[in-house]
Amino acid sequence: MSSNRPYLLRAIYDWISDNNLTPYMLVDATRNGVRVPPHVIKNGQVVLNLAMRAVANLDLGNEWISFQARFSGVSHSIQIPVPAVLALYAQENGQGMMFPAEDEEHSGEPPSDTPPSPPEPEPPTGDGDKPKRGGGSHLRVVK
């Protein structure tokens, strides 16, 4: 059978958006095929805002997620292979879904039972990039 990950990603994205929350996607930036600006990668991961107001031409496909986004005022074409997605969650309350890391060479084997740990929270950078969320359910004002 094909992976259920792209179907779950679309469903969680719709659920978050339908509740007027901001969908954030945690990506393993070390995976082959991940195309994001290098300066947004922290500890091998990147958190991307997928809100309709933040991206253009969003395509949540079965193999790839692609869209246009601006980082520090510069437009970039973003491409993420679906297996590189580690989590999709609402920025405001952390609700969503984490996905097990898939082995690139052995994607047919069962995934590890250990979920990836969320990134450590970082202070706002002031250059328009969104901060990463840590564990807890708290809100933070970002200007």
Image: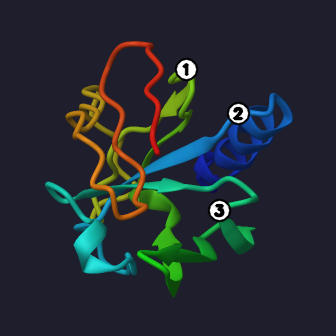
Residue with the most extreme top position: 137
Mark 2 is surrounded, within 10 Å at the Cα level, by few (under 14), some (14 to 19) or many (20 or more) other residues, namely: some
- Dots 2, 1 in contact, CB < 8 A: yes
Residue depicted at x 36% and y 33%: 133
The amino acid type of the residue labelled 1 equals Asn
Q: Is residue 1 left or right of residue 120?
A: right
The amino acid type of the residue labelled 3 equals Ala
Task: List the residue tagged with mark 3.
Answer: 54
Q: Is residue 120 left or right of residue 141?
A: left
Q: Position of residue 101 (x, y in %)?
A: 32, 46
Front residue of 98 and 138: 138
Residue with the most extreme right position: 18
Lower sequence index among marks 2 and 3 = 2
Task: List the residue tagged with mark 2.
Answer: 21
Q: CA distance from mark 2 to mark 1?
A: 9 Å
Residue depicted at x 59% and y 71%: 63
Task: List the residue tagged with mark 1.
Answer: 93
The amino acid type of the residue labelled 2 equals Leu
Lower sequence index among marks 1 and 3 = 3
Is residue 33 placed above or below 65 in the rendered structure? below
Q: Is residue 10 left or right of residue 131?
A: right
Front residue of 97 and 5: 97
- Dots 2, 3 in contact, CB < 8 A: no
Residue depicted at x 53% and y 76%: 70
Q: Quadrant of residue 12?
A: top right
Q: CA distance from mark 2 to mark 3?
A: 13 Å
Mark 3, secondary structure of its residue: loop
Q: Position of residue 83 (x, y in %)?
A: 44, 59
Mark 3 is surrounded, within 10 Å at the Cα level, by few (under 14), some (14 to 19) or many (20 or more) other residues, namely: few
Any mark on residue 133, and which?
none
Residue with the most extreme left position: 43
Q: CA distance from mark 1 to mark 3?
A: 19 Å
